[in-house]
């Protein structure tokens, strides 16, 4: 798969087959994030890997999925949930650019996962105090995003914006995600 195919295919997935994410892949995802660029090389990011079925299941009610859709359509059912999570945290007093590092790390892991047959969804609408308590995350590790992982059980396709310019994603008749994107010429100035 070339890089363009990888970036186009690496969409957000919210329904998954119940195939476990291999331990080796979870290790490789965190390793890829670890060696990614870091502002001022501060390396303030920390990770929590959640892989046991019991803990993955316990986290589900603490996550809020697909805000653009009704809950019954956007939230994965028990047979569609991710099979692992990686939580990205900032340790201590981070520099002002640490959230950029979070984005770089999460996208790196999402691309790596997709290149290995696994989809992902980055989640920020999370009940963090409950997650921190469940996982015994150290107090000075401040969770920023969750990367939900699993084998996708639906398609996610980029579509043109409708005439009214709405950017909300939606489901088609087969419950596959349609994600409107602006055209390149509408977002880029070339001089």
Image (tube, rainbow, N blue to C red):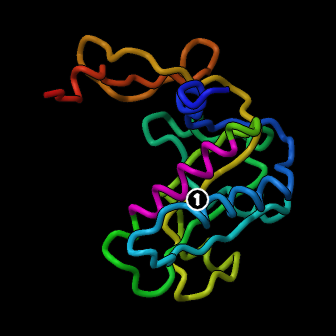
| Membership of 49 in magenta stretch | no
* Residue 39: percent from left, percent from top: 39, 70
- Nearer to me, 101 or 144: 101
In what quadrant of the picture does the C terminus appear? Answer: top left
On the rendered structure, is 33 left or right of 31?
left
Query: What range is drawn magenta here?
Result: 100-113
On the rendered structure, is 78 left or right of 172?
right
| Membership of 107 in magenta stretch | yes
In what quadrant of the picture does the N terminus appear? Answer: top right
- In the rendered image, which quarter is residue 160 located in? top left
* Residue 64: percent from left, percent from top: 54, 52
Mark 1, secondary structure of its residue: strand
Q: Residue at x 68, y 62 (%)?
A: 30
Q: Is residue 144 above or below residue 152?
A: below
Q: Residue at x 86, y 52 (%)?
A: 22
* Residue 124: percent from left, percent from top: 48, 57
- Nearer to me, 160 or 68: 160
Crowding near the residue tagged with mark 1, few <14, some 14–19, many ≥20 C-alpha atoms within 10 Å: many
* Residue 9: percent from left, percent from top: 59, 28
On the rendered structure, is 158 left or right of 18?
left
The residue wearing badge 1 is 146
Q: Residue at x 44, y 16 (%)?
A: 159
């Amino acid at each position: 798969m070339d890089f363009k195919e990888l970036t186009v295919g690496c969409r957000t997935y919210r329904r998954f087959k119940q195939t476990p994410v291999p331990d080796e892949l979870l290790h490789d995802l965190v390793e890829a994030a670890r060696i990614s660029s870091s502002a001022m090389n501060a390396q303030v990011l920390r990770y929590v890997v959640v892989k046991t079925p019991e803990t993955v299941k316990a986290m589900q009610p603490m996550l809020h999925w697909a805000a653009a859709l009704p809950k019954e359509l956007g939230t994965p059912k028990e047979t569609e949930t991710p099979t692992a999570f990686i939580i990205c945290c900032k340790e201590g007093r981070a520099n002002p650019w640490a959230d950029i590092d979070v984005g770089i790390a999460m996208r790196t892991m999402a691309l790596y996962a997709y290149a290995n047959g696994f989809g992902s969804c980055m989640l920020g609408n999370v009940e963090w105090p409950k997650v921190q308590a469940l996982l015994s995350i150290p107090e000075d590790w401040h969770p920023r995003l969750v990367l939900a992982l699993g084998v996708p059980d639906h398609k996610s396709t980029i579509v043109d914006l409708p005439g009214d310019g709405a950017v909300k994603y939606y489901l088609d008749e087969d419950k596959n995600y349609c994600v409107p994107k602006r055209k390149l010429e509408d977002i880029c100035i070339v001089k």
